[in-house]
Image (cartoon, rainbow, N blue to C red):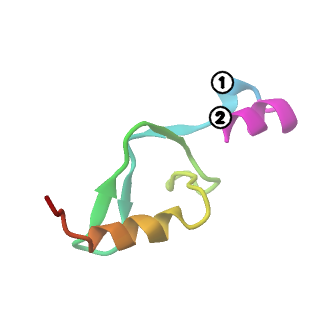
Amino acid sequence: GVTKLVLKDKIPLDKISYVDFPTIRFNAKESVEMPFRYIVMADGKEPLLPPGMKELLHEDLNKGIDF
């Protein structure tokens, strides 16, 4: 993420856009608020997530909490 942008792509740290605690929406009733700060994608709205992360988060919504 950030390390690649700064070291490989030579983008200054202060030029990288971030979003704090983004909400990932799957539909009108399902969403997840992510902890931490994430790089914003080129569209300026969605956080940059690893491949498959959004699908994994959506699958986790359907799991119960077993004690």
Q: Is residue 42 magenta?
A: no
Would you say the magenta stretch is mainly helix, strand or loop? helix
Q: Amino acid at mark 2?
A: Ile
Which of these two is toward me, 33 or 65?
Answer: 65
- Total labels drawn: 2
Residue 43 to residue 29: above or below: above
Q: Residue at x 75, y 26 (%)?
A: 12
Specify the quadrant of the image occupied by residue 24. bottom left
In this rendered view, identify the residue nearer to me: 67 or 10: 67
Residue 20 is situated, as x and y percent measured from the top left of the image, at 42, 37
- Image point (69%, 25%), residue name: 13
| Category of crowding for the residue at label 1, using alpha-carbon neighbours closer than 10 angstroms: few (below 14), some (14–19), many (at least 20) | few
Quarter of the image with the N terminus in it: top right
Q: Position of residue 23 (x, y in %)?
A: 35, 53
Q: Nearer the viewer, residue 53 or 66?
A: 66
- Type of residue at label 1? Asp
Determine which residue is flagged by label 2.
Answer: 16
In what element is the residue under mark 2? loop
Q: Residues within 10 Å of mark 2 (few under 14, many from 20)?
A: few
Q: Within the image, what quadrant is residue 3 found in?
A: top right
Name the residue carrying label 1.
14
Against 24, residue 39 (above or below) is above
In magenta, the rendered stretch is 1-11
For the residues bearing labels 2 and 1, Cβ distance under 8 angstroms: yes
Q: CA distance from mark 2 to mark 1?
A: 6 Å
| Image quarter (top left, top right, bottom left or bottom right) of the C terminus | bottom left
Q: Is residue 2 located in the magenta-colored stretch of the structure?
A: yes
